[in-house]
Image (cartoon, rainbow, N blue to C red):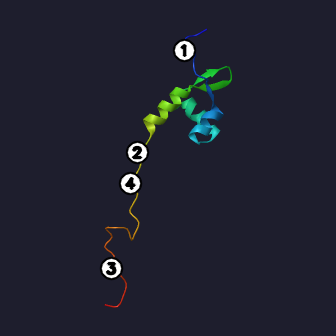
């Protein structure tokens, strides 16, 4: 028995669900080498550690959202007569 058994490999369908992309896109990206994978027979399998690494290296930092009108610091004039 192995001391450190390899992780369960993911199918293309698993990866599509994780990345929330179409299955065909997963196959295309794997064929282009943009997603690391291995072919075993007719199946293309993915190491979950590599998918996690891919997500970490391609993650974008969150964007700052614009402040809604009427929040503190807003310089709107009050409506009225004077």
The answer to which of marks 2 and 1 sits earlier in the sequence is 1
- Mark pair 4, 3: CA separation: 26 Å
> Residue 77: image x %, image y %?
33, 79
| Element at label 4 | loop
Residue on which the image places disc 3: 77
Q: Which numbered circle lies on residue 4? A: 1
Answer whether labels 4 and 1 touch (C-beta < 8 Å): no
Answer whether labels 1 and 3 touch (C-beta < 8 Å): no
| Residue 73 picture quarter | bottom left
> Closer to us: mark 3 or mark 2?
3
| Residue 9 picture quarter | top right
> Residue 16: image x %, image y %?
61, 38
Residue on which the image places disc 4: 64
Crowd tier of the residue under label 3, counting other residues whose Cα lies within 10 Å: few below 14, some 14–19, many 20 or above: few
- Mark pair 3, 2: CA separation: 35 Å
Q: Report the side of 40 relative to 69 (left or right).
A: right
| Element at label 1 | loop
Answer whether labels 3 and 2 touch (C-beta < 8 Å): no
- Mark pair 1, 3: CA separation: 67 Å
- Mark pair 4, 2: CA separation: 9 Å
């Amino acid at each position: 028995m192995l001391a450190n058994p390899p992780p369960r490999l993911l199918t293309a369908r698993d990866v599509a669900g994780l990345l929330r992309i179409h299955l065909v896109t997963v196959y295309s990206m794997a064929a282009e080498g943009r997603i690391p994978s291995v072919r075993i027979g007719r199946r293309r399998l993915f190491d979950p550690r590599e998918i996690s690494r891919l997500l970490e290296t391609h993650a974008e930092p969150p964007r700052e959202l614009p402040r809604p009108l009427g929040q503190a610091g807003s310089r709107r004039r009050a409506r009225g007569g004077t």
